[in-house]
């Protein structure tokens, strides 16, 4: 149980950190990608609104082809060689650019322009601002995006924007390879760092987890030790009380008082035995005696003694056991499991009830069920019946006997065999205990 608690603590801590890292890294990468995409859109809109060219404020004075009309060399003087390019300084201070656009943007941006007429026929191609794309390639890209009938989007590493004009359309393509490569590199680096961080935290939590659960370990160990010591200490007075009762019956004969003492000592002895059994099964050192045996024969032999008591109480006990079924497990524990479930059904079934026990194969598993009708059906979650000392019908405690610990032992046996046990509510106040091994 301690190892299970330790594993749960490590897994919860690790997965919690992993979830936080996924959320943080995912959010950062999404924001980065959105911002990158927005910057590219700003460049596309700027180029499309200026007929495929950057505005005059970006142009070099020594760029004869793109020299703005409003900037002319004074008195016909030409700038000296090596002089810095001049930028138009608008009134009121420096020009404010859109986010992601600076004075260096024209020098970093690789793009090409394709113009079409009103019929969608390509009339002009401008690849002067990119070396990786020829005129034929540009026409091919343009034909592809025109077929998509979308005004913007990606085609390979290029993002495009189609802007309608009076004479046709202008398609601007911007090379996004650098931006996409940067975003991918950032994603890989952030994910790698996150995984390394999670791994380091997993190792640290695993190393220090025993210190974290140390108070729980001490509490559980003290509880186990108390149950074991109390069980052994109670055996002696129970044996003495039982022996004294025998002496009283020999000297004074049997009476209702000696009979009551005998019944209560028997009940107390059973409780001590069950508590010690649960305590042993909780211990990590407890091992089952694994062997392959005939589970059909074991179930039939363990269930047959309940036929006579059921008949004496006016109840019907029937079995439906598939023959020749084998199982690898602890035979004595499986027999105890059958005894517990049959005894529980006999105690808590209503008058003239039908108690049905079935054993069958279900694929690679073995299905074992015990059904009975309840006069007063337990309320709430039926799986609480497997809790220690829980009584589904507290008003019948004195009548039925027992101490509410049998089903807890049944669950411990099933879990020790890596199986599953559950209580299911069926029609007509029928409760079914279902075991899958």
Image: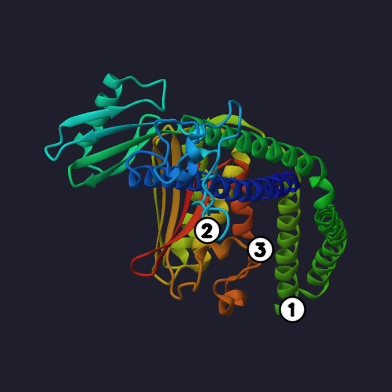
Identify the residue under disc 1: 257
Q: Which of 345 and 215 is in front in this view?
A: 215
Per the model, the C-alpha gap separating discs 3 and 1 is 30 Å
Q: Give SS at disc 3.
A: loop
**Which residue is drawn at the image coordinates 32% and 41% (left, top)?**
51
Image mark for residue 388? 3
Looking at the image, is mark 1 or mark 2 earlier in the sequence? 2
Q: Is residue 402 above or below residue 220?
A: below
**Which residue is drawn at the image coordinates 28% and 37% (left, top)?**
171
Disc number lying in front (3 or 1): 3
Q: Quadrant of residue 129?
A: top left
Looking at the image, is mark 3 or mark 1 earlier in the sequence? 1
Quick one: label 3, few (<14), some, or many (20+) residues within 10 Å? some
Residue 281 in the image: state x and y as whole percent: 71, 47
Q: Can residue 168 be seen in this view?
A: yes
Q: In this view, does 45 lie to the left or right of 104?
A: left
- Which residue sits furthest front? 75
Q: Give SS at disc 1.
A: helix
Residue 206 in the image: state x and y as whole percent: 76, 41
Looking at the image, is mark 2 or mark 3 earlier in the sequence? 2
Q: In this view, does 161 lie to the left or right of 68?
A: left
**Which residue is drawn at the image coordinates 54% and 59% (left, top)?**
343
Q: Is residue 363 above or below residue 55?
A: above
Identify the residue under disc 2: 91
């Amino acid at each position: 149980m301690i190892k299970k608690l330790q594993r749960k603590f490590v897994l919860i801590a690790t997965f919690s950190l992993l979830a936080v890292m996924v959320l943080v890294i995912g959010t950062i990468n999404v924001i980065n990608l959105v911002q990158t995409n927005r910057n590219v859109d700003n460049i596309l809109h700027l180029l499309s609104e200026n007929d495929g060219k950057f505005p005059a404020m970006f142009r070099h004075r020594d760029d004869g082809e793109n020299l703005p009309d409003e900037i002319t060399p004074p008195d016909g003087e030409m700038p000296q060689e090596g002089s810095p390019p001049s930028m138009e300084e608008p009134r009121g201070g420096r020009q404010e650019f859109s986010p992601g656009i600076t004075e260096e943007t024209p020098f970093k941006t690789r793009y090409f322009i394709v113009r079409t007429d009103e019929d969608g026929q390509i009339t002009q191609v401008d690849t002067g601002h990119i070396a990786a794309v020829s005129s034929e390639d540009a026409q091919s890209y343009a034909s592809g995006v025109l077929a998509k009938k979308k005004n913007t989007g990606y085609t390979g590493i290029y993002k495009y924007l189609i802007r309608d004009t009076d004479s046709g359309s202008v398609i601007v393509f911007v090379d996004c390879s650098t931006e996409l490569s940067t975003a991918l590199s950032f994603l890989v680096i952030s994910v790698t760092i996150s995984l390394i961080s999670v791994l380091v935290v997993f190792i640290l939590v695993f190393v220090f987890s025993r210190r974290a659960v140390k108070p729980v370990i001490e509490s559980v160990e003290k509880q186990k030790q108390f149950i074991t010591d109390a069980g052994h200490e109670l055996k002696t007075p129970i044996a003495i009380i039982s022996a004294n009762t025998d002496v009283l019956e020999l000297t004074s004969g049997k009476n209702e008082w000696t009979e009551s003492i005998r019944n209560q000592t028997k009940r107390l002895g059973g409780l001590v035995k069950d508590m010690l059994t649960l305590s042993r099964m909780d211990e990590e050192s407890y091992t089952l005696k694994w062997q392959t045996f005939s589970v059909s024969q074991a179930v039939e032999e363990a269930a047959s003694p309940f036929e006579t008591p059921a008949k004496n109480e006016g109840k019907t006990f029937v079995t439906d056991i598939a023959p020749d079924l084998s199982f690898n497990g602890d035979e004595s524990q499986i027999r105890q499991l059958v005894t517990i479930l049959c005894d529980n059904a006999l105690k808590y079934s209503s008058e003239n009830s039908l108690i049905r026990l079935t054993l069958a194969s279900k694929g690679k598993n073995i299905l074992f069920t015990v059904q009975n009708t309840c006069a007063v059906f337990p309320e709430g979650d039926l799986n609480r019946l497997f809790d220690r000392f829980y009584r589904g019908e507290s008003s019948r405690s004195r009548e039925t006997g027992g101490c509410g610990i049998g089903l807890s032992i049944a669950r411990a046996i099933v879990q020790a065999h890596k199986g599953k046990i559950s209580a299911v509510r069926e029609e007509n106040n029928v409760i079914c205990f279902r075991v899958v091994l």
